[in-house]
Amino acid sequence: MQNSLLKNRKIISVRLDKDVYCIEVVIKQTYLEGVEDFFFVITNRYNEDNSMYLDFVKKDQLNDFDLFEIMVPFSSDIEKLVEGEIWDLHILRILDNNEVKSRIKSKGHELNLYSIVQEDLEKMVYPYTTKKGNFSFCASDYKLFSMFDELHVKKDGTIQFSGYFNYPPLFQINGYEFGQMTLLVKDNLTENERMVPLKSVNRAEQGKKYIGSKLPENIGFQGEVNLLEELELEQVKHFSFYMVLDYKINGVQKQLLSLRMKCNSVQGLPVRYILKVKDKKVQLRIKSTKVSEYLSLSVSRYNLKAEVVQGIKKRWVKIRRSKRLISWYKAAFTVIGMLVPTNKKLVVFESYHGKQYSDSPRAICEYMKEHCLDYKLIWSVNRASMNYFAQKDVEYVRRFSIRWLLIMTRAKYWVNNVRFPLWLPKPKHTIYVQTWHGTPLKRLAMDMDAVHMPGTNTSKYKANFLKEAGNWDYLVSPNAYSTEIFQRAFQFNKNVIESGYPRNDFLKNSNNEETINNLKRKFNLPLDKKIILYAPTWRDNQFYRKGKYKFNLELDLMRMREELGDSYITIMRMHYLVSQNMDLTEFEGFAYDFSHLEDIRELYVISDILITDYSSVFFDYANLRRPIIFFTYDLEDYRDNLRGFYFDFEEKAPGLLTKTTEELIAGVKDIQSKQFKVSERFEEFYEKFCYLECGQSTKRVVEAFVQTEKVTMDVERE
């Protein structure tokens, strides 16, 4: 093999030998120089302390590289491995008595063909390439994989294709019988789904290529489809592809939908085809998505001017996101921060990474707008939220723009409720007021035993957190309980403003019938029904990728509507980190999605009952002295494996704990049938966590950091 094709820590082959994965990887010899010892390990992604050391042998020397074969025996410890879900392959080097772990790289998404079925556990194990090009193993429920490997576009727009699929139980468990294959085509503009019959073809060479993969000969398919027929060209239409597999298991007919189909062969195809359809020029684009290699196909009217503009925009986005530009921006920020004069009356606000006009920064801004007339108040806004802020009566600037750089470096005050980017240097003259965003139930920062978030690990997360917390000058705390935790978990030893949360002033000052009815009219909600607010938190280990989390809705809305729909409606408010929209169309009139409402405070005021889990929303909602029900279907896992709690949640929670929708419904009915009275347990909770919330918290915070700075400046002048 040519040296130019070899890359350090790169896998060059995988095979299966009696349920043992044999993985060949090359390691550059200089990479192991000075190393006291080294090992290959697989590490559980959700618990980095859970690792398994692997047997390996050195097989060969390829110029400047050593070739190793690593053995991963999934036949032993299978229950542990399946339960771990995802395992990442590392090389572990011992340098100066320190352990240095590095990922092993791979390429290609055909690795799932080396899958192993564990029939007793109804699970499958397979290797795969992560979105960052690393090699991992996944243990999951049975999945149907399908892949295009040949595409050809004819002059009339017909696409001829071939490929192969893998549904491991079909090939590895007795009782499964192969049936029909169909291609399912979806688009982004309509609800139409086109079904295209597929022809089964012999792919014996695939089984020879993937040694030990247990693949039969009939895993291939071929077919053709024309997506230009009856095409509307007013908007760009994007197509995605799936396979539908019909099969029998023990004589019972079944049908299965694959994951979105990938494509590993578009490199040899033109990116764009210009075709004529009904005397109109049509543009057909074919590509595989950059990371996941899904087949992506789009059709639109051809417009040369629009193409040029789009090309320029794409190049600019690429430049804007480059590491070089970020380095330049950081350097410019530092230099300008030292040179430009401070505007002692300039305050910059940001809430949830510039996405919202909400929370305590909003309360502080509104107070200062009314009482600090000589201050200039500007919001830092995410690019995607510019239109949203244009409708607000506030001044704002786009995050990371040149104007933003000039404003941030001149500002006397920053007010934020989450963290700024780690690379952002704080000028010496700037006072950073961190309001935070909730009373802590779940362990924070240095108190966390393990971090399960994507794109980081426990030590890196804690180090980055402490670096950011070191920039804070003031930290807002809602009560003495939080102050103690914040100071320890954030290792914060500067100014704590123990004031109550500014955002909760609204709950104290707007809790009246007139405001509640006006808000219900504003949201087009019925006045004659009571409102249940469902506001759960996110799960660290449920994510699509770094920064994009998902949430599995365990609440049975159908059952709730049947049992409670005559008297109640439900409004849903998901955590800001949960990125996807919910489809509630089948629950129209009963369930409403308010996840993207600017500020949850209005939903608190109009709701009669709060349903939550481990979200800090219940600390705020308790200020209204209304009933709270906890839907804690995964309590043990969340408490013991993900975050851990600061106090005995089951003993101290100010409301009923439920684990099923049935228990939750019974709790609502019990509240409905009885006059809600604040219990002794609720009263104890209120006195510990809400005692400072009296509608004056914002005033306390503003006076603390503004007046303190005035005193400091006066002393310096004297």
Image (spheres, helix red, strand yellow):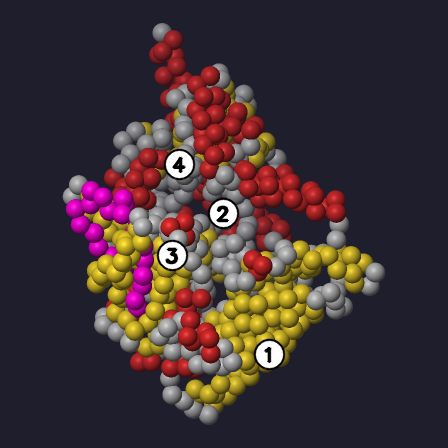
Task: Say which amino acid is labelled 1.
Answer: Leu
* Mark with earlier residue (2, 4): 4
Q: Is residue 289 magenta?
A: no
Q: Nearer the observer, disc 2 or disc 4?
A: 4
Magenta-drawn segment:
21-44
C-alpha distance separating marks 1 and 2: 53 Å
Residue identifier under label 3? 1
Task: Say which amino acid is labelled 3.
Answer: Met
C-alpha distance separating marks 3 and 2: 63 Å
* Mark with earlier residue (3, 2): 3
Residue identifier under label 4? 422
Q: Nearer the viewer, residue 304 or 702?
A: 304
Picture quadrant of residue 55: bottom left
Q: Nearer the viewer, residue 578 or 177?
A: 177
Residue identifier under label 1? 198
Q: Nearer the observer, disc 3 or disc 2?
A: 3
Contact? badges 4 and 3 (CB < 8 Å): no
Residue 270 horizontal/vertical position (percent): 64, 57
C-alpha distance separating marks 1 and 3: 38 Å
**Picture residue at 27% right of the left edge, 36% below the top:** 491
Task: Say which amino acid is labelled 2.
Answer: Arg
* Mark with earlier residue (4, 3): 3
Under tag 4, what secondary structure? loop
